[in-house]
Amino acid sequence: MEHLSDHELMEAYVHGSDKAFETLYARYRRKLYIYAYSLLKGVPEAQDAMHEVFAKLISNTRAFSQAANISAFLFAACRNYCINRLKSRKYRQAELPEFAVLKTAGPVHEAARHEEAQLLNGIIAQLPREQREVLVLKVFSGLTFAQVAETTGQPQGTVATRYRLALARIKSALQTQER
């Protein structure tokens, strides 16, 4: 079922295929978790958000199956849940948590890679929230600019600009660190 599109999986799920739901879950659970974690900054809350999105998918299967872009619909549902959580906690701005941006290649490289990851995570954490959000959706969740725009409710040009600005700030900060 992994080769099926999101719409084909939703159709199969609507017609009773539990395997189709399992495939959608496997396809999006990590991406939704990372996105929720970037907004909520907590493991239990990010897990709750991810599970809430899939519970919403189960309870509103028809709405999800009729969505033009199921991926964007899932991320929008996740974003809305997270924003509501943040509002209930009276946060004004979510901070980006640490991400395992750089994968270790073994024990020989582990210390250097860890230091690089910490540096990059620190730089990302300093980005304005809107730029961090776009960066997380684009890089860590693998969404296209159109999907990020649909998820955030911002024009695609605005999303692309925020992404470009985030990359420019990261590049500048890395160059400053090298000096």
Image (cartoon, helix red, strand yellow):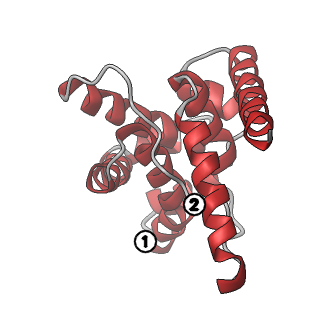
Q: Specify the amino acid type for callout 2.
A: Ala
Name the residue beneath numbered marker 1: 18
Percent from the top left, x then y, of residue 92? 32, 19
The local crowd at label 1, few if under 14, some if 14 to 19, many if 20 or more residues have their Cα within 10 Å, is few
Q: Quadrant of residue 103?
A: bottom right
Q: Compared with residue 30, is residue 63 higher up or lower down, i.e. above or below?
A: above
Q: Specify the amino acid type for callout 1.
A: Asp
Mark 2 or 1, nearer chain start? 1
Quadrant of the image containing the N terminus? bottom right
Q: Is residue 1 left or right of residue 16?
A: right
Q: Is residue 20 left or right of residue 69?
A: left
Circle 2 sits in a helix, a strand or a loop, which is it? loop
Q: Residue at x 62, y 31 (%)?
A: 134
CA distance separating discs 2 and 1: 32 Å
Q: Residue at x 64, y 36 (%)?
A: 135
Quadrant of the image containing the C terminus? top right
Percent from the top left, x then y, of residue 5? 68, 57
Q: Residue at x 33, y 47 (%)?
A: 49
Circle 1 sits in a helix, a strand or a loop, which is it? helix
Q: Compared with residue 32, is residue 177 higher up or lower down, i.e. above or below?
A: above
Front label number (2 vs 1): 2
Q: Which mark is residue 28?
A: none
Q: Is residue 3 left or right of residue 9?
A: right
Percent from the top left, x then y, of residue 19? 49, 74
Name the residue beneath numbered marker 2: 100
Q: Is residue 10 left or right of residue 97?
A: right
